[in-house]
Structure formats: C-alpha cells, structure tokens
Image: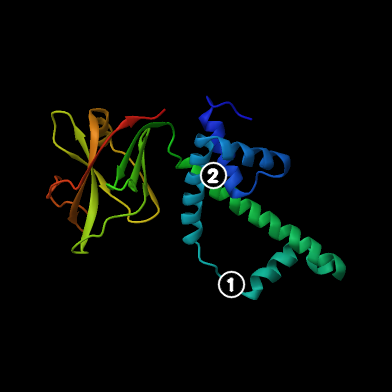
C-alpha cells in the first residue's frame, strides 16, 4: 500500500475506490487499509460526501429515439447479427458510464482541497459535534453534524476567523447538512494564519450585511494543527 507520507496518492486511491474504478485485489486490500487507518477513512468519507452531492445534482433525461438511432448508425450496429447487438450495446453503455465516472473524478480532483493544515471542531456540551472545519491550502471544507435549532428560522450560521489583534474575518455561511467547501481569499487565508480560534454567530440569511458579526458568538473552537 501507499505510505502515510504520500497523502496525494492516498487521496487518489480513495477517490477511485468511492467511484468504483478500483477493482479486484486492489479494492479488497484498500478496504482492509481503510478499516485500520483514520486518514484513509477520512479521505473516503470526503469523496463519498462530495460525489454523492454531485450525483444528486444530475437529473436523468430520456433522449429522443433519434439519438439512439444515430448512435447505432454511426457505429454500424444496424448491420450486426441480432444476437450480438445486446453485447455490443452493453459494451457501449459501460464505456459511457466509465467516461462519466472519470469525468466526475477529474472534476473533483481539480477542485480537491490539497494539503490539510488545521482543524477545528465545534461540539455541544454533550460532546456531539456540530461542525468540523478543515483548513486546507487555499480551501475550506466544513462537515455539518447535529446542529442546534435556530430561533427564529430566518437566520444563518456564519463562521469567523479570529485573528490576534484584528477584527473577525468572515469565512462564509455554514452548511446545515452535509459538506460544503469553498476557496479562501487572500484576506481569509491571512486571517486564519494569524488566528488560533474560529467562532460561529447567528446572522441574517446570507450572512452578516456589515462584514462583521452582528451578534455574540454562540460557539468558539480552537484551531489545531493537523497531525
């Protein structure tokens, strides 16, 4: 297997595993590795959540009959023996699925977060996590857990970096479910570099209109270096 000091290779294997292109003995070895290695489990979870979000946004569309007829004509399927058509059609379908899957993998690897630098976890008094914030090189990834109830409901949770000796800097509205990721601006990266804590406030929908918190933080968590 890939050594722990090669996180990019681990990330690629995790993406291929989730996508289903990692097959046979390699897949079985990876499954055992995932069960015993937290870093591998974390990268698999990242790809599962993000690829699922991508799949949810794809709506099936039934093409008109002329599309399939044109494909058959282009590939000369109309002149094949009848008993061979299903096999050829299945091969074509498998190729289309493989191309779509590889395209999705390339899409997410292009947007991949890079190296993990810092982590912050917001928790309830019971210990249940509310949000996990992962700070990568130039990107922020947030996993939502069991959220507190908003009262009133026409509000959003907003994340803030708390740089030492400076004003809070918004890191964006937090997700209520699932995982969200976004690119960090130079200002946000600088604020995080000078911060040891991040905080959450309740703001109007869409975030604070002033660029600064409009309420007292309801949660504060330390930023800790990723091990």
Q: Which label belongs to residue 62?
A: 1
Q: Position of residue 64 (x, y in %)?
A: 61, 74
Q: Position of residue 163 (x, y in %)?
A: 19, 31
Front-lying residue, 81 or 214: 214
Image point 65% across, 46% down: which residue?
Answer: 21
Ranked by sequence position, the earlier of labels 2 and 1 is 1
Residue 167 vs 159, above or below: the answer is above
Residue 33 vs 150, above or below: the answer is above
Image point 51% across, 66% down: which residue?
Answer: 59
CB contact under 8 Å: marks 2 and 1: no
Q: Residue furthest front?
A: 126
Position of 87 with respect to 48 (left or right) is right
Image point 67% across, 42% down: which residue?
Answer: 27
Q: Position of residue 98 (x, y in %)?
A: 65, 52
Front-lying residue, 206 or 70: 206
**Residue receiving disc 2:** 106
* Element under disc 2: helix
Q: In this rendering, does residue 206 appear at all?
A: no
Distance between the alpha carbons at the discs numbered 2 and 1: 25 Å
Image quarter hosting the C terminus: top left
Position of 200 with respect to 37 (left or right) is left
Image point 61% across, 36% down: which residue?
Answer: 33
Position of 158 with respect to 91 (left or right) is left
Q: In this rendering, does residue 21 appear at all?
A: yes
Image quarter hosting the N terminus: top right
């Amino acid at each position: 297997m890939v050594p722990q000091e090669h996180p990019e290779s681990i990330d690629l294997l995790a993406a291929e595993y989730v996508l289903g292109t990692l097959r046979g003995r390699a897949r079985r070895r990876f499954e055992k590795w995932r069960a015993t290695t937290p870093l591998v489990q974390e990268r698999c979870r990242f790809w599962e959540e993000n690829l699922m979000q991508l799949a949810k946004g794809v709506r099936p569309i039934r093409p008109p009959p002329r599309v399939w007829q044109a494909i058959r004509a282009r590939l000369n399927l109309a002149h094949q023996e009848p008993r061979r058509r299903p096999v050829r059609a299945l091969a074509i379908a498998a190729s289309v699925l493989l191309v779509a899957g590889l395209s999705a993998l390339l899409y997410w690897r292009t947007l991949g977060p890079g190296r993990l630098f810092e982590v912050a976890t917001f928790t309830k008094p019971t210990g249940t996590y509310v949000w996990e914030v992962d700070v990568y090189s130039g990107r922020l990834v947030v996993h939502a857990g069991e959220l507190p109830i908003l009262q009133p409901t026409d509000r959003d949770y907003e994340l803030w970096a708390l740089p030492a000796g400076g004003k809070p800097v918004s890191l964006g509205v937090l997700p209520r479910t699932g995982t969200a990721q976004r690119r960090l601006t130079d200002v946000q990266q600088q604020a995080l570099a000078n911060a040891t804590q991040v905080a959450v406030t309740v703001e109007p929908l869409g975030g604070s209109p002033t660029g600064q918190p409009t309420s007292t933080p309801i949660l504060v968590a330390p930023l800790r270096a990723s091990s």
